[in-house]
Image (tube, helix red, strand yellow):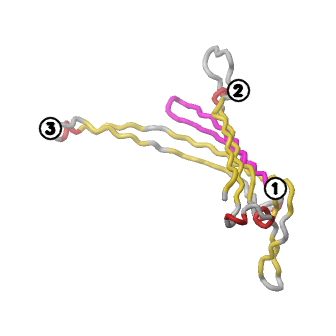
């Protein structure tokens, strides 16, 4: 059973945009961001056992916050540059730890600990794109055809992204 699921979203907005526009947009006015939160709670149990102590201990729940930030710039009227950064934070109310038992060569699951546990991750990137147009004149080579020309477009794109290794010991979680 999944109960409740709650979502909250804020549409894209431009936090640095001037209220009274005078002249062209400044580069920082093109920065946009949004926000979303999602709360979930789920348990796998039979109908008769849903509100028992055992099923309450099996519940998996948490809250996820996501904040994407991006901007879009045009350089030389033909290149589109789009930098972005994303931050995600998760809140959990139960922690399950596992440890390696070298005597039996198995993973031992420890008793869950209840409390407030915060995990996060972030990444950043930039992409560059443009559009190239071409025209192939059909009528010049094939005089009898009704098609005069074929127009084609090419959309090359280059992306770079960075995300730290959150499996590193310094973060304290995986």
Residue of label 3: 143
Residue at which label 1 appears: 93
Residue 33 picture location, percent across and down: 67, 35
Of pointers 1 and 3, the one earlier in the residue sequence: 1
Q: Who comes first in sequence, dot 1 or dot 2? A: 2
Q: What residue is shown with label 2?
A: 16
Give the residues in magenta.
64-93
Rendered location of residue 29, percent (x, y)? 66, 26
Quarter the N terminus occupies: bottom right
Nearer the viewer's eye, disc 2 or disc 3? 2
Report the residue that reaches farthest toward the front.
48
Q: CA distance from mark 1 to mark 2?
A: 35 Å
Q: Earlier in the sequence, mark 2 or mark 3?
A: 2
For marks 1 and 3, give the CA distance.
Answer: 74 Å
Is residue 89 highlighted in magenta?
A: yes
Residue 29: which disc?
none
Badge 1 crowding class, 10 Å Cα cut-off, few under 14, some 14 to 19, many 20 or more, is some
């Amino acid at each position: 059973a999944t109960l409740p699921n709650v979502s909250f979203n804020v549409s894209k907005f431009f936090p640095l945009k001037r209220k009274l526009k005078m002249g062209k947009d400044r580069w920082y006015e093109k920065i946009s961001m949004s926000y979303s939160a999602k709360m979930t709670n789920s348990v796998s149990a039979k109908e008769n056992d849903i509100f028992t102590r055992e099923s309450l201990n099996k519940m998996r729940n948490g809250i996820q916050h996501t904040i994407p930030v991006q901007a879009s710039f045009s350089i030389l009227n033909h290149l589109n540059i789009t930098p972005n950064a994303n931050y995600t934070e998760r809140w959990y109310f139960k922690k399950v730890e596992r440890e390696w038992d070298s005597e039996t060569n198995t993973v031992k699951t420890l008793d869950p600990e209840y409390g407030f546990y915060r995990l996060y991750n972030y990444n950043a990137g930039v992409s560059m794109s443009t559009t190239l147009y071409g025209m192939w004149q059909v009528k010049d080579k094939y005089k009898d055809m009704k098609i005069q020309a074929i127009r084609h477009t090419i959309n090359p794109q280059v992306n770079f992204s960075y995300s730290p290794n959150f499996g590193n010991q310094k973060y304290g979680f995986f």
